[in-house]
Image: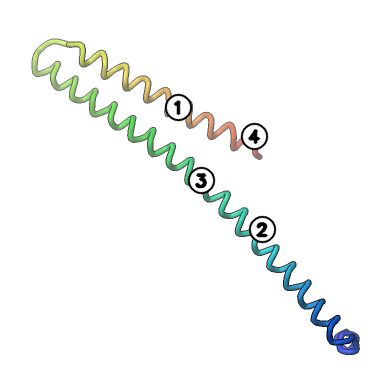
């Protein structure tokens, strides 16, 4: 098999090697491009999830503080209602995010 290649003129051998090298480089570049796009998508999802998680933690702290003030003062005030509304909104937004991610993954499969 290699004897046939050795019988070819030198410029043709160089051209064949160049073509093979170009194809290999193109395949490697396509793989890295695909991997980078996938990582960017995952990083974007992680950033969204972190933002929503932080919002939920903030709502939980607000609710805990409002509860502590209500317990300390002996009555429920406007802070409790605002904290409950904030917590419910954060929870709903996080739930919608999880459902959105799950539906996209199921549609992709």
Q: Mark 3 falls on what kind of element?
A: helix
Mark 1 or 4 closer to N-term?
Answer: 1
- Residue at label 1? 95
Which quadrant does the N terminus fall into? Answer: bottom right
**Which label lies toward us, 1 or 3?**
3
Q: Which mark is residue 108?
A: none
Mark 3 or 2 closer to N-term?
Answer: 2
Mark 3 or 4 closer to N-term?
Answer: 3
Residue at mark 3 to residue at mark 4: CA–CA distance: 17 Å
Judge from the rendering whether residue 68 lies leftward or rightward of residue 42; answer left or right.
left
Q: Mark 4 falls on what kind of element?
A: helix
- Residue at label 2? 30
Mark 1 or 3 closer to N-term?
Answer: 3
Q: x and y percent of residue 73 in the render?
A: 8, 14
Mark 2 or 1 closer to N-term?
Answer: 2
- Residue at label 4? 107
Residue at mark 1 to residue at mark 3: CA–CA distance: 18 Å
**Which label lies toward us, 3 or 4?**
3
Q: Mark 2 falls on what kind of element?
A: helix
- Residue at label 3? 42
Point out the residue furthest to the left here: 73
Name the residue at 62% across, 53% down: 34
Residue at mark 2 to residue at mark 4: CA–CA distance: 24 Å
Q: Measured along the vertical axis of the image, is residue 19 above or below residue 104? A: below
Q: x and y percent of residue 67 in the render?
A: 18, 20
Q: Measured along the vertical axis of the image, is residue 41 above or below residue 11? A: above
């Amino acid at each position: 098999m290699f004897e046939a290649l050795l019988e070819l003129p030198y410029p043709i051998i160089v051209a064949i090697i160049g073509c093979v090298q170009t194809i290999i480089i193109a395949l490697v570049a396509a793989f890295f491009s695909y991997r980078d796009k996938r990582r960017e998508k995952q990083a974007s999802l992680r950033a969204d999830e972190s933002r929503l998680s932080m919002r939920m933690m903030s709502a939980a702290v607000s609710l805990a503080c409002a509860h502590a003030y209500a317990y300390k003062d002996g009555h429920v005030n406007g802070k409790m209602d605002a904290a409950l509304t904030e917590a419910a909104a954060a929870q709903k937004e996080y739930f919608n995010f999880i459902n959105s991610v799950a539906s996209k993954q199921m549609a992709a499969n």
